[in-house]
Amino acid sequence: MTQHRFPSLRSLLSGRHPGNLTQNWGIQSKVLFLALVPLLTVSMIVGYYLTSIRLEDARQSLMRHGSTITKDLARSSEFSMAIGDIQQLENLVSASLSYPEIQSVTIYDANQKILVSQQKKIQQKRPGKYPQPIQFIETVTPAQPGNAELQEFSGDHASTAALGKVVVTISLAVLDKRQREIIFKGSIIVLAGALFSALLGILMARGVITPIQHIIKGVEHIGQGNLSTRVQQTSTGNLGQLEAGINAMADTIQTSQQDLQSRIHQATAELAQSVNILKHQNTELEQARQAALQASDAKATFLAQISHELRTPLNAIIGFTHLLETEIEEAGQQEYLQVINQSSQQLLTVINDVLNISSLESGQLQIDKKIFNPAILLEDVVIMLSHEAHKKGLEIALLIHQDAPDFIEGDPVRFTQILTNLINNAIKFTHNGEVVITADASRSKDGTQNLHVTIRDSGVGIKNMDIKSLFQPFIQGDNSVTKQFGGTGLGLAIAKRMTEQMGGEISACQNPQQGSSFWFTLPANQQTTTAITADLCLTGKRVILVESNPFTRRAIRNLLLSFNMAVFIKPDIQSVLTTRPHERTDQTTDEIILLGLNKPEATRPALIQSVSDLQKTGANIIVLIGDEATARKWSNHFPPGHLQVTTKPIRRKKLFRLLNTSEPVVTTAHGSAPRKKYPTPTKIIKTLIAEDNRYNRQLLKTYLQKNGCEVDETHDGLDAVAQAGKQPYDFIFLDLHMPGLDGVSACKAIQSHKSLNRTTPIIAVTADIYFEASDTGFSDTIYKPLTEHALQKILGKKIQIPQPPEVTDHEPSTTHPPGLIPEITAQFNALKQAHQALDQAELKSRIHQINGLTRFFSINELPPIGLALEQAIDKGTKADIDCLIVQLDQKIQEIQKIYR
């Protein structure tokens, strides 16, 4: 039964209110308080008043009695003092001491000589508690005949005729006793009155309180749910009405409770029916959810399988196409191979987009949290995609402002992917003009600093109504644009989700003139700072910049100003020729002419002649050409001298190297120096390949053999485990998906097998871009499609030979400044002196300088020994350091012979 809780009637009747001082009192206490307090107050006031009056009367009576006794004694002793009857005086004094309050009596003559003095000892119940006794003094004068009034009036003035004086001392002990009797009796009377008032108040209150207590108990029972409880109607008047009202209320509540109970039973029955329906629906929903999960798992499995099945033949197509490009020289066939390669790369991009969006939707794509420099990745992506822009005749420029954050926290791989998607779109949808990438700083609403990257193009533009739907999967802004340019419509959706997972935001807008702008922000890491550009300084050098495109001109000017150089802008090459002397002077020795050209400008005969004329004056010229083939022709056309040719856009560090040296360079792809062959190992590298696809196996074998490796091959994991148990290998390459025994199981079997290959580096070969080698026992991973460069990096990590060069604009100049070898020799001599002096700090500083020089200028003979020596200084023994210094000395002597 449902219980109804009501406010306690006891609390209502007791008047409990936060502002009431008697809020915790019951009605009985209040009735007694109202009955007793006034009466007791009046009784105490009256008792106090009457007692005070009686106490004062007792005091005044004592004073009168003492004065009367003194005067009577003075009159009685007049005759005896006149005749000198001492005996009679003693009798009078003795009679006076018979009074209880008289303490002592003394009679003096006219000369203040004591005639008679007597006192008695009064028993004191409270010694020391009484005030000093009171003395009464009366002068004794002889009786005068005549008018009595006149006699009394002149008494004070007849002192010369005075016979003496009487001194009577009265004790207050009797007064104190009398006063205590008065107070005691008064208190008894007041207490009796109070008890009588209390008894009367209790009797009166009981007639009111008892019915109220019955009402309170009845209401409490009703409040506890006992709705059949009724209050006995024994009172009349207001209390009787209250009892009748409470009983009527109980009847109403009981009737409502019964009605409510019947409704609850009905609702419960309906609810039970609804619950049964919901259970049935939940069962169906759970079955549907399980089916959806199974479908999702099947989708993931299908995507992984189709990824492997698609990427495996693509791996063979791209790999063998690359091999043919390096061997076939006929122009027509080269063009066919480029078409095959581009089509394969396009198909690979589509596959990667589908896999990425699937992983993002399922939450399986993990975002790393690393701190990295975005400027380097911006340069990488822009230079990587510049070739495609230049093929369409577009100008591409990268503007990195000074306020751009040096570091951000996120996933560098995903950051590169976001940039690639956005810049690719800008290039794809732009027919002519330029694509400008800008990086600067911005502030979020909470005040934190962000990296703000904007990709602006002069292409077809975006309709405002299409901007919101651009970042949805499989949707492009305009169906006509989709038909014209193609694409899956996944790139922007992937970029948006990756940006949001790294804590940023992304959007787009239409340019006021033409084209569109896409921008995204990522939070900066403000706790990490480093002087990444402190060493790139060319103070004192002058640069004359000639560049027709305003965006490229601004980008190059920003780079030059970051080197602390003096920059002068000229409109064209002719203006440089007219203001420059015909011969090289001291003023122009440190002056560099930086000429930026697009393909049409670079093919003009007049401009080529002007550059030739400028070269004859001895000017230091750096030419940046937007077309790779044209840059190569310029390098072949001009004779060696103070002329360097490369492509644009250009990396910051590479521009610094070109500005810091007057030696010419020969350009190839992306304006880099001619690609070096991978160094031949000093010993034969034995490798084992386990790959079920014969095309991929053949491609991997060809790459390894080109790099001086001896290759054994097999098509399944079981045979790989068997061969690994027979002979040692330097490297083992295992495909993850093989019949019989997969790559992970084969790796564990080889490492657990008691053979010489327990510590051999085992490399995973897979098309699964989300595979992590560190969790499965593999030493490293090489992803399909295979590239020779990626394979060379794997080999370079595991054996002590120089690392392969990058196939990008990272490649440094193959020429060295004239003073480089003497500088390395001087640093090494200082290193030996520090070693002899046991100066550990100087020794470490010198080897750090040598390693920096050799790595910067790609003197590949020294870094392995230099790095080993730097580690030995920190952790090795003196014998190790001595041995490495001898080896380093031998290598430096060999280098001196080579570069002499």
Image (cartoon, rainbow, N blue to C red):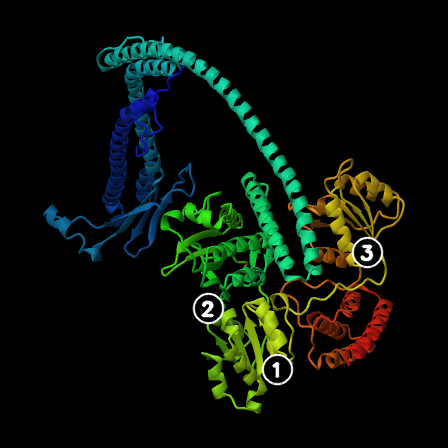
Counting other residues with Cα less than 10 Å from the Cα at mark 2, is it few (<14), some (14-19), or many (20 or more)?
A: some
Secondary structure found at label 1: loop
Whether pointer 2 and pointer 1 mark residues with C-beta atoms closer than 8 Å, the reply is no
Secondary structure found at label 3: strand
Identify the residue position indicated by label 3 in the image. Answer: 709
Q: Position of residue 345 (x, y in %)?
A: 60, 51
Q: Quadrant of the N terminus?
A: top left
Q: Position of residue 154 (x, y in %)?
A: 14, 53
Secondary structure found at label 2: helix
Instruction: Look at label 3 and name its amino acid.
Output: Cys
Residue 551 is marked as: 2
Instruction: Look at label 2 and name its amino acid.
Output: Phe
Instruction: Look at label 1 and name its amino acid.
Output: His
Q: Position of residue 628 (x, y in %)?
A: 58, 67
Q: Residue at x 59, y 34 (%)?
A: 299
Q: Position of residue 550 (x, y in %)?
A: 44, 70
